Every structure is written in structure tokens, then in C-alpha cells.
């Protein structure tokens, strides 16, 4: 219904933005954040969607409240803790190996002297 973001323009009044949430818990956090910022809003429930209409002039506060909801209900990308920390350790090891390889290679190239190139051209008359 809302696409990639959870808000859209009000269908009847273009001065309002409508935020939608699929769970009551998300809606309650959003509402608490709006109250914290003293932002006026209208709310409604259509089926399983909790809707909040907010004036476009209060969009900054609404975006902060929406971000708080995202933070509160965000799932980790890798849910298995063992796999998550294994990936972090693997990435750290790869970075360390890359740095060690770079340092060793740069020391090797600094220690090498430029070879003396002989003039191999001969003039034939």
C-alpha cells in the first residue's frame, strides 16, 4: 500500500502526510515520539494498518519519530549470532592480511635497487 517508504501524501489534503504502520507496537512507539515532540496528528485504523496524518510543516519531527520506530524494530541482517560474529572475524582477518601484504610488498619494492641498464644500441656505419 505504501511502497518503499511508509508514508504518502494525504489523498484529500495535500498539506498532510500519512504514515502507516502494520503493527500496533510500531504505531504506539510512533505516537509516543510524536507526543514527545508535541506534534499534532490525526490517527485512524484501516484493517491492520495504523494511519497517522501529520501536517507537512511538521515533517522533520515526523521523520525523527519514524526513525525511532525503525531503530526500535530493526532486525539484524544476519540473525544467527555465531554466523554474524564469524563473518565479522573473517572480514577483520581479510583486512589484516591485506594490510600485512601491502606493507611487506612496499618494503620489498623500496629495498630493490633499480637495475643498471646498459646501452645496447650500436651504430652501424
Image (cartoon, rainbow, N blue to C red):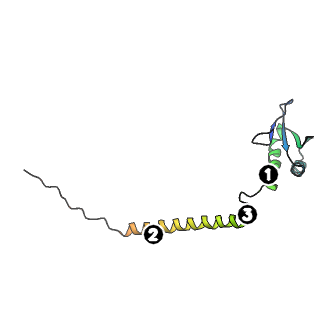
Residue drawn at the location 80% of the way across and 40% of the way down: 7
Compute the Cα span from label 2 to label 1: 45 Å
Residue drawn at the location 86% of the way across and 30% of the way down: 13
Residue receiving disc 1: 70
Q: Position of residue 92 (x, y in %)?
A: 60, 66
Residue receiving disc 3: 80
Callout 3: 10 Å neighbours few (<14), some, many (20+)? few
**Earlier along the polypeptide chain: callout 2 or callout 3?**
3
Report helix, strand or loop for mark 1. Answer: helix
Q: Of the residues tagged 1 and 3, which is closer to the observer?
A: 3
Q: Where is residue 17 in the image (x, y as percent from the top left)?
A: 83, 37
Residue receiving disc 2: 104
The one nearer the camera, 43 or 83, is 83
Residue 6, quarter of the rendered image: top right
Residue 71, quarter of the rendered image: bottom right
Residue drawn at the location 81% of the way across and 54% of the way down: 73
Q: Of the residues tagged 2 and 3, which is closer to the observer?
A: 3
**Earlier along the polypeptide chain: callout 2 or callout 1?**
1
Asked if the residue under mark 3 is in contact with the one under mark 1, i.e. CB atoms within 8 Å, the reply is no
Residue farthest along the top direction in this orientation: 12
Asked if the residue under mark 1 is in contact with the one under mark 2, i.e. CB atoms within 8 Å, the reply is no
| Rendered view: 94 above or below 70 | below
Which quadrant, please, contains the N terminus? Answer: top right
Amino acid at each position: 500500500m505504501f511502497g518503499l517508504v511508509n508514508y504518502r501524501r494525504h489523498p484529500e489534503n495535500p498539506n498532510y502526510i500519512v504514515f502507516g504502520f502494520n503493527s500496533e507496537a510500531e504505531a504506539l512507539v510512533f505516537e509516543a515520539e510524536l507526543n514527545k515532540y508535541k506534534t499534532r496528528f490525526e490517527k485512524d485504523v484501516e484493517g491492520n494498518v495504523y494511519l497517522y496524518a501529520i501536517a507537512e510543516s511538521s515533517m522533520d519531527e515526523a521523520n525523527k519519530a519514524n526513525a525511532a520506530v525503525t531503530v526500535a524494530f530493526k532486525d539484524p541482517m544476519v540473525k544467527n549470532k555465531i554466523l554474524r560474529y564469524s563473518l565479522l572475524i573473517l572480514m577483520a582477518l581479510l583486512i589484516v592480511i591485506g594490510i600485512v601484504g601491502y606493507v611487506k610488498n612496499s618494503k620489498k619494492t623500496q629495498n630493490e635497487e633499480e637495475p643498471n641498464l646498459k646501452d645496447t644500441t650500436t651504430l652501424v656505419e
